[in-house]
Image (tube, grey):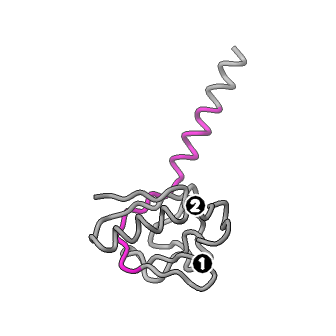
């Protein structure tokens, strides 16, 4: 019985954490990469640029390989005016993502056709 209650508690904690996540569906107006390799996107849902990865080095646990894939998706989204989803494990309003390198790292970025 104790194992079952422990399992139930673990499942509740997992789902309560997922409920506190931020799923930011938006379009990307602009993309730039600075001289350090840090990639920034200007999201339609908020004013200001948001950093999301670095092409040269690990940035907030995001590898350059993952970053290259994300940059490719963002370029495609900008060119086609397609939507994207930025997922963050932290809970906040998508309109209040911190700017530039102060932004948290996304858990994933998804292209929404």
Badge 1: how crowded within 10 Å, few (<14), some, or many (20+)?
some
Residue drawn at (55%, 59%), measured in percent from left and top?
Answer: 66
Query: In which quarter of the view is residue 26 placed?
Result: bottom left
Residue drawn at (64%, 31%), measured in percent from left and top?
Answer: 9
Q: CA distance from mark 1 to mark 2?
A: 12 Å
Determine if the magenta segment contains residue 24.
Answer: yes
Residue drawn at (46%, 76%), measured in percent from left and top?
Answer: 41
Q: Position of residue 73 (x, y in %)?
A: 41, 64
Q: Is residue 9 above or below residue 3?
A: below
The circle drawn on residue 106 is none
Q: Which residue is mark 1?
A: 37
Give the quadrant of the N terminus: top right
Q: Is residue 50 above or below residue 106?
A: below
Q: Position of residue 22 (x, y in %)?
A: 49, 58
Q: Which residue is mark 2?
A: 65
Residue drawn at (54%, 40%), measured in percent from left and top?
Answer: 15
View extreme (right): residue: 2
View extreme (bottom): residue: 35
Query: In which quarter of the view is residue 35 placed?
Result: bottom right
Camera-nearest residue between 8 and 81: 81
Q: Position of residue 34 (x, y in %)?
A: 56, 84
Badge 2: how crowded within 10 Å, few (<14), some, or many (20+)?
some
Determine if the magenta segment contains residue 96.
Answer: no
Would you say the residues marked 1 and 2 are in contact, meaning their CB atoms lie under 8 Å apart? no
Q: Is residue 66 left or right of residue 112?
A: right
Query: In which quarter of the view is residue 30 placed?
Result: bottom left
Instruction: Tell me the SS state at disc 1.
Output: loop
Camera-nearest residue between 102 and 108: 108
Q: Which residues are magenta?
A: 10-30
Camera-nearest residue between 30 and 1: 30
């Amino acid at each position: 019985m104790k194992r079952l209650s422990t399992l139930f508690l673990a499942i509740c904690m997992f789902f309560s954490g997922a409920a506190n996540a931020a799923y930011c569906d938006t379009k990307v107006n602009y993309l730039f990469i600075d001289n350090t390799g840090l990639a920034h996107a200007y999201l339609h849902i908020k004013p200001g640029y948001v950093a999301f990865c670095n092409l040269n080095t690990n940035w907030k646990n995001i590898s350059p390989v993952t970053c290259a894939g994300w940059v490719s998706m963002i370029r495609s989204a900008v060119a086609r005016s397609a939507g994207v989803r930025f997922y963050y494990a932290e809970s906040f309003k998508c309109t209040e993502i911190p700017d530039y390198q102060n932004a948290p790292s996304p858990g994933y970025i998804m292209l929404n056709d």
